[in-house]
Each structure stands twice: as C-alpha cells, then as structure tokens.
C-alpha cells in the first residue's frame, strides 16, 4: 500500500499515535521482512513517528501486534535477523457460506467437463485461500477438486508436448507393473470420471492408449524428436463405430473428442465414434447398460457380446 | 517484563480494526469493542480518534447510515489477468444461477474478493479490458430452473412424494423419499433422495421429475443398505474410493469395498465398466440384478 501522508489530518493531531505506530509497523512487515535497525531507519524519517522511538518501542509494538493475533517470527540467523510476518487477522475474510458457494460453483464447472476452465478456477481459488478464516476452509479452496494429486508442472509440460507434437519418456506408476519408464507421444488430454488422462501412442507397448496424469511421476528426458511414422504400427488403426442411446443415458450424454452425434430424435441419439482404444470404448458402452445398442460394425458387436459373456461367466463361476 | 510489554492504546485500535474490517459498526459498537479490552469507559471522541488514525494510514473508512465500514483491507491481493477473467466469469454466471442462496452467497463472496483487490489489480482492470473466461462453459448445471424449488424441499426436511419419468420405459414411476441435496454432473442438476422403499439413496434428474408434493411428515434418513464388491488385479491397486466407500478387506491382489451411498441402479452401471475385475458379493439381490442387467444387454442383440 502506498502511504500518502495526509496533511489535513495530521494538522488535527486527533489520532492515537501508538495505534498509528502499531498499524504502520504492521503495514511495513506486510510488504517485506525487516530487521529492527531497518525499522528504526524507516521510523526516523517518518513525520509522525520520528520522536520517542527506541528499540524497546519496537519490541513493545511487535508484542502488541502479536497479542492482536499476528504471527511474527523472532529475528534470528535463519531469518537474517528480520521480523517475518507469517499471518495476521486483518484480512476481509470469506465466511464458510461463501467458501461453500464457491465450491458449489466449482462443482458446476467440473460437471461441464472443461478441465482447462477447472484448472484456471483452481488457480484463482488457491489464491483466495488467503481469505479463508480457518485451515479447513483454506484446504477446501486449495484442494477440494479432482486435480489435487496432479503435478501442475508435469501437466504443463504434457500440454507443450501435445502442441509441439513431440514425444517424451515418462516415469509412470502403473497399477500393474509398478514404476515403469514409458516412451509416450501425447495427443490429447481428456477429463472423465473426475480424472485427467493423457491419450497418445505408447511406444513401449505399440498401443494407442491413455495414462492417468496423476500417476505420471516424472518426465525423465527432455523432448526427443517429433514422432515419425515408423514409431508405431498397430496403434494407427481407427475403427468407426455407431451406437444408439436412449433414456437417461441419452439425456445426460456428453460427446468426447472422438465422438459426434449424427442423428437426434425425441428420445434417442445416434453417435459415431472413432475408436482407437477398444478397452476404453467398451468400458464406456458397458456403463450405458441397456440404454445403448451398438449398431455397427458387426465385429465390434460380436466382441462386445463376448465381453458380456465373460463378465457373466465370472459371476456364474463364483456361484 | 520488557519482553511481554504491550501498548494498550495500540492494542485497542487493532482490536477495533479487526472487527470493523469484517462488518459495519456504529459508534456505540466501536466503543464497546474498545472498552472490552480495558477496564475504563471512553467517550465517543475516541472513535473519531481511531477513524482519523485509520484514514491517516490510507485505510478507507466510510460512514454510511450511521455505521462505519472499511472499503478495502490493509493487505490486498494481486490478481493477474487470468484470475480476473475467472472472477468475471463467476460474475457473468450469476444471472443464470437458479439457487437463491448460492447466488446471494456468491455475490457476497465476489464483493469481499473485490475489497481485497490490490492497487496493482485495480490498475490491471483500468488498463485492460478483462473478459470473462470462456463463456462456453460456466456451470450450466447450476442454471436448471427447478433447483430453487428442490433446494427449498431439502431445507424443509419433509417427506416428498415424487412422480418421476423413466425415459427408457417411457412411464411414470412414484417414489416416496427424504430429499437430501442437489448435486451437479454432466451439465445437469440431480436431486439425491433417500428412498424409503429400497432403504437406499437414489439420484433423480431434476428435469425428469414430473410432480413433487411435500407430505406433512418429517423426513428421516436411516442407514442405507450397503453394496459389497470385490475388485481384482490392477484395479485393486489403483482404485480410488468414492464418497461413502470403505475398504473392508485387502488381499494380495484384491480389495473388498463397501459402498453405502451410491444409487443402487447407477452403481451397477459403474461396476460393470470394470469387466471381470469386479464382482458384487453382497447383497444377493444386487448380484442377481447385475446378472439380469448383463442378460438384458445381451438380449438387445438377439
């Protein structure tokens, strides 16, 4: 804050000088940590405080601020002999009802599925945590979102890889194999079931698949060369599938990046999907239950029926 | 002891500022705060002295309707353009938000946030045209017109009789529920209710509720019956527990999870996604329901 000296008020002299001193000192510490000598030097120049200001007065003023709820560390070697203001109770704070409203708003945005927007909102909320009255509320603002386990630096690097069409080596915590190194060429990011996934060519398994971004522990190497046509073979295959949705699934349906609605009637949707990862696609279709019918191609319908048969067999074997 | 000595007059001003920064106060209220920290009583002139001191420090104290309030805090926050555009996005969403409480609390929150703007932030706003972030999405689910009504039902805690459209079978179903809360997903608003007949929680898409009547009985929520399922292999290692779930057993390559909150129809659709890596163990009725669901899915292709 810019402390403009107000001549008119000073002339009145109807102020509390000790109160002024305490607040002025607090405002100095808000701007930066200061040693006792630095504070003395500032005060010597100050037209209102300049008189009667000793080292003891600084100690008393610091004590006064502490009693009022300021957390100020003692000057030590570690703090370069400076007073460091860690927190103070003079913020205009958000109440619990405000925090809850902001959180409900974030849930609404999350339900829209725009992960970029959620990320921006998270950045804002992290800053607003300073205005939360207690640690629980601050924690809600900072962490109560689906990306709280994601390393933002890694996510930002992945976004760059996608833009520049480059590949990289990830250290990935695979649920099956534990930590493993994967050469991966990221293509897009999706946000589903409250998780962020990076899709691309997994060169180690010659597969077009996805990785959970919160499980990418490290980007091991700088960028390799851009992906060449020889880098992958099987993963290039794309199958075009059409499926029909009705009921609740049609009402709540949101297309992903590889889908488009090609026909809409009052109660049904016909969707065309470009499938590059069949496991993921069948997962999606299974979740629609009886409200979905695969229309074409026949090979996909047959494979899906085999999956249903296997799941049923698992239940029957278990008794 | 010198080390603990404080200045009482300074302390009184700080206490007054602490309260004044949160809410508007009259002269009498300000005086009583000052007197709380002392055994003395003071004249009203003391308040003038405090107000002058704060103003001299450029703290903007405003008097309105015989109450003082502080327009801006003393430790303000620098917001960058991206953060300001998100604030603008929240502001632009307000007219569409249907929940009265949510709208009101967000408006208040935005006022508080603006009172914490730093000079630097003000300058950014003055110099640049801040536009709301991507208007494509801004919590569309919050705009459902029936939210207001069902939010009121949740607050009033009376039993609710619902007529609900099953869009798959194109028929109307009747439910007697305890309304619990509104949730938002897939750009839609849903009512979570405790369904007495099945002793479980159920999700209702607000736009499919054809009719709702409050009954003159207080709604009560019992402990819902849980669904227990086994997850195997890699899924067991990577599974993230949902709200209302606990792991009741953990083995070498499996976990057994108990879920007490999820809608019993929706949990089937979620668990079937896990292929053969998931098996419902209990209750038997849910296991049978899963088998029935699979068979019905197969019949679609007969």
Image: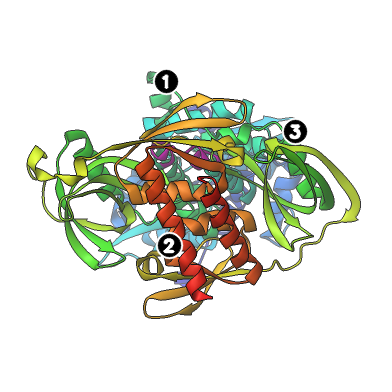
Quadrant of res A296: top left
Please indicate, yes or no, whether residue A49 appears anywhere in the rendered image. Answer: no
The spot of residue B192 in percent (x, y) is 68, 51
Locate residue A93, reporting x and y percent. 56, 47
Instruction: Give the residue displayed 14% in from the left and 44% down from the top.
Output: A233
Chain ID of residue with mark 1: B
| Tag 1–tag 2 contact (CB < 8 Å) | no
Taking the spot 74% from the left edge, 63% from the top edge, the residue there is B199
Chain under disc 2: A
- On screen, residue A101 versus residue B164, left or right, reads left
Chief SS of the magenta region: helix
**Would you say B205 lies left or right of A99 here?**
right
* Residue denoted by label 3: B66
Nearer to us: label 3 or label 1:
1
Q: Is residue A149 visible?
A: yes
Which secondary structure, mark 2?
Answer: helix
Q: Which residue is mark 2?
A: A310
Callout 3: SS: loop
Which SS class for mark 1? helix
The residues colored magenta run: A108-118
Mark pair 1, 2: CA separation = 64 Å
* Residue under disc 2 on the same chain as residue under disc 3: no
Q: What residue sits right under mark 1 in the picture? A: B126
């Amino acid at each position: 804050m810019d402390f403009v000296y107000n001549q008119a008020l000073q002339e009145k002299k109807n102020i509390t000088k000790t109160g002024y001193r305490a607040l002025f000192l607090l405002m100095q510490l808000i701007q930066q940590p200061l040693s006792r000598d630095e504070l003395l030097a500032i005060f010597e120049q100050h037209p209102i405080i300049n008189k009667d200001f000793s080292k003891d007065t600084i100690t008393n003023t610091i004590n006064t601020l502490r009693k009022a709820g300021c957390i100020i560390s003692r000057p030590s070697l570690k703090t370069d002999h400076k007073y460091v203001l860690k927190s103070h109770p003079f913020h205009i704070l958000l109440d619990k009802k405000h925090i809850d409203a902001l959180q409900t708003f974030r849930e609404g945005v999350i339900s829209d599925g725009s992960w970029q927007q959620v990320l921006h909102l998270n950045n804002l909320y992290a800053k607003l945590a300073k205005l939360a009255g207690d640690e629980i509320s601050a924690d809600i603002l900072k962490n109560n979102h689906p990306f709280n386990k994601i390393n933002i630096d890694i996510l930002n690097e992945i976004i760059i890889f996608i833009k520049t069409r480059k590949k990289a080596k990830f250290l990935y915590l695979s649920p099956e194999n534990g930590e493993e190194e994967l050469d991966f060429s990221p293509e897009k990011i999706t946000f589903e079931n409250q998780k962020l996934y990076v899709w691309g060519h997994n060169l180690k398994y010659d597969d077009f698949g996805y990785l959970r971004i919160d499980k990418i522990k490290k980007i091991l190497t700088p960028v390799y060369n851009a992906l060449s046509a020889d880098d992958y073979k099987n993963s290039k295959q794309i199958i075009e599938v059409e499926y029909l949705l009705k009921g609740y699934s049609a009402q709540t349906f949101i297309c992903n990046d590889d889908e488009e609605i090609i026909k809409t009637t009052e109660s049904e949707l016909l969707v065309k999907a470009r499938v590059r990862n069949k496991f993921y696609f069948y997962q999606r279709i299974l979740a629609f239950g009886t409200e979905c019918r695969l229309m074409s191609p026949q090979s996909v319908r047959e494979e899906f029926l085999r999956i249903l048969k296997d799941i049923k067999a698992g239940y029957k074997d278990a008794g | 002891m010198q080390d603990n000595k404080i200045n009482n007059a300074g302390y009184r001003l700080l206490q007054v500022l602490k309260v004044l920064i949160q809410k508007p106060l009259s002269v009498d209220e300000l005086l009583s705060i000052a007197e709380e920290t002392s055994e003395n009583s003071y004249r009203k002139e003391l308040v003038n002295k405090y107000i002058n001191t704060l103003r001299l420090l450029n703290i903007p104290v405003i008097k309105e309707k015989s109450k003082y309030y502080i327009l801006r805090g003393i430790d303000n926050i620098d917001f960058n353009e991206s953060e300001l555009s998100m604030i603008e996005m929240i502001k632009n969403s307000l007219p569409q938000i249907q929940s009265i409480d949510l709208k009101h609390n967000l408006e208040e929150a935005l006022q508080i946030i603006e009172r914490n703007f730093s000079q630097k932030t003000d300058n950014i706003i003055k110099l640049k045209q801040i536009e709301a972030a991507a208007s494509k999405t801004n919590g569309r689910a919050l705009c459902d017109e029936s939210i207001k009504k069902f939010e009121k039902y949740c607050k009033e805690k009376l039993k609710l009789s619902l007529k609900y459209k099953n869009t798959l079978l194109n028929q109307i179903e009747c439910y007697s529920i305890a309304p619990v809360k509104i949730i938002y997903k897939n750009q839609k608003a849903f009512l979570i209710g405790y369904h007495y007949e099945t002793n479980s929680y159920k999700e209702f898409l607000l736009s499919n509720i054809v009719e709702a009547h409050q009954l003159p009985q207080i709604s009560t929520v019992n402990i819902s019956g849980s669904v227990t399922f086994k997850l195997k292999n890699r899924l067991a290692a990577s599974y993230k527990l949902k709200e209302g779930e606990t792991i009741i057993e953990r083995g070498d390559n499996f976990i057994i999870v108990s879920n007490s909150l999820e809608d019993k129809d929706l949990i089937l659709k979620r668990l079937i996604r896990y292929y053969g890596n998931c098996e419902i163990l209990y209750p038997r009725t849910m296991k049978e329901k899963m088998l029935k669901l699979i068979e019905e899915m197969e019949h679609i292709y007969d």
